Amino acid sequence: MSENKRFLISGAGLVGLLIAQAFKARNIDFVIFDRDIDVHYRENAGWAITLHWALENFKSLLPPDLVEQIYAAQVLPGFHEKDTGKFIYINAASGDPVVSIPPSKRLRVRREQIRRMLLSGIDVQWNCKLDNIDTTNSQVTVTCSDGTVFTGDVLIGCDGANSMTRRIICPENGQLYQLPVRFCGSRVKMTKAETDQIAADFDPLLFQGTVPENNTFFWFSMLATPEYTQEEDVYYAQVNLSWNVPDYDEPFVTNVDKTEAMKVHSQGLNPKLKWLVDRAVEDPDTILEINLCDWPVVEWPHQTQVLLAGDAAHAMTMFRGEAGNHGITDAFELMKHIDEYLAGRKTWEVAAKDFCSGIKARAAPAVLLSRQACLDAHNFSKIRPDTDSPLLSMRKNTK
Ligand SMILES: Cc1cc2nc3c(=O)[nH]c(=O)nc-3n(C[C@H](O)[C@H](O)[C@H](O)COP(=O)(O)OP(=O)(O)OC[C@H]3O[C@@H](n4cnc5c(N)ncnc54)[C@H](O)[C@@H]3O)c2cc1C
Ligand SMILES: *[C@@H]1O[C@H](CO)[C@@H](O)[C@H](O)[C@H]1NC(C)=O
Ligand SMILES: *[C@@H]1O[C@H](CO)[C@@H](O)[C@H](O)[C@H]1NC(C)=O
Ligand SMILES: *[C@@H]1O[C@H](CO)[C@@H](O)[C@H](O)[C@H]1NC(C)=O
């Protein structure tokens, strides 16, 4: 018989909450805590993510009433029923498509809405920022910066790309690798007429491109329509701009630094796109610099007492849109091994080791493919129909 374990989950993001839902469904003893001060703190973290190859595993971990809400979180309502499927990569100076390929089955959803859905029925301990881990006895003890202490048998670090859990248990090699690229993203308000024009010229959902002369990368994707904004003629899109910075040192400090850089680097864009960046810089508060970093190690000590999952285990850049899909797969695989442990088919040591070797084999190569995709997105010579770049290969379903 397997002994009942108590799990501590650090981080109530996509992956931590998904694991919490699966634990709840199995009556497993757990506590989940997050550094955010309360549930509303990240309500407007306006990103969208694409669920593709992990969609079925995602659904399998949730109760049926929550599964329906995934479809309601789509950036374009009902899009999954009419995805006419085209994934285009353009020359961002001329506006002409360079590569146009059928996408894999996909669901483009608002991340904040998915997180809200995953929170239902889960009691998160907010305002608990993990700050110390003690694994010296048979238990794991976590101390938060406000002094709160949690004790359990296993800690699952789901605390994101910059994971404190990872940095504590891997003092030597837990830090992120910085890519030589600077990235700024912004949420842009649009009208219906403007949205329709973009859809007619490029694509209704998302597209990306590179300026050949200096390899500036441009990304457009829809975020919300009036069905979600509840305001007539109010649409939102995500506009990202990124460029090579061989000697990247520090993130921008002020809004002026960000807007000036975006102005300079939008110069080569086709006028049908450049106005989107012009609008973004009018509202500097919406501009966010994202540090392009990754962690290809995907291996850590104390594996029977501390596990990592999601971005904490395999931080990667978003140029293949895969990180969330890997995080969901981590949760799915973890539950598979835990179910075998609970059924008495594996000892805890074997279940934990199997999870760790599986995640390393799957995610370490994925981190490096995303790194290459990021570099290639800023190198126009790699954007060709016959390319073997991982920037475009997954879209062709060759994973
Ligand atoms: C701009 C952008 C676009 C993306 N697009 C896609 C996409 O199209 N497709 C895709 O598959 N993936 C995409 N991703 C990645 C995807 O969003 C992440 O992989 C996913 O959200 C990771 O979930 P997570 O639970 O591991 O981490 P997160 O969602 O980052 O959650 C981590 C949680 O841990 C908490 N936390 C942090 N530190 C502590 C601490 N010390 N103590 C307690 N709590 C802590 C945080 O508050 C947070 O709630 C994108 C990411 C970004 C940034
Ligand atoms: C740009 O921003 C969107 C947010 O909608 C995000 O999903 C996407 O991954 C980003 N893409 C890249 C390659 O920068
Ligand atoms: C990029 O190239 C375009 C076209 O040659 C040019 O107009 C623009 O100024 C360049 N931008 C940068 C940052 O070099
Ligand atoms: C683009 O890729 C080519 C071929 O690998 C390489 O020689 C070149 O230096 C790269 N350019 C940039 C800007 O990275």
Image (tube, rainbow, N blue to C red):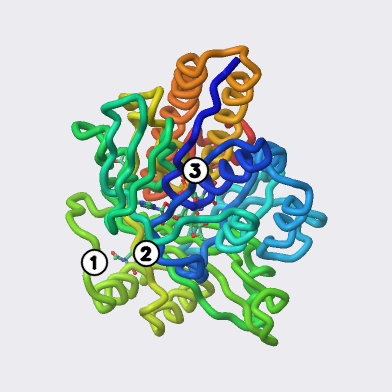
Mark 1 C-beta to ligand 3 under 8 Å: no
Q: Nearer the viewer, residue 36 or 112?
A: 36
Amino acid carrying mark 2 in the image: Cys
Q: Residues within 10 Å of mark 1 (few under 14, many from 20)?
A: some
Q: Dots 1 and 2: beta carbons under 8 Å?
A: yes
Amino acid carrying mark 3 in the image: Ala
Q: Residues within 10 Å of mark 2 (few under 14, many from 20)?
A: some
Q: Which numbered disc flags the more N-terminal residue, 1 or 2?
A: 2
* Relative height, residue 88 to residue 383 (above, below): below
Mark 3 C-beta to ligand 1 under 8 Å: yes
The C terminus - image quarter: top right
Q: Which numbered disc flags the more N-terminal residue, 1 or 3?
A: 1
Residue 243 screen position, x and y as percent = 33, 57
Kindly report the distance in space between the C-alpha atoms of the residues bearing marks 3 and 2: 19 Å
Q: Nearer the viewer, residue 287 or 148?
A: 148
Q: Residues within 10 Å of mark 3 (few under 14, many from 20)?
A: many
Residue 41 screen position, x and y as percent = 45, 69
- Which residue in the structure is indicated by mark 2? 184
- Which residue in the structure is indicated by mark 3? 323
Residue at far right of view: 81
**Looking at the rendered structure, which numbered label has been put on residue 252?**
1
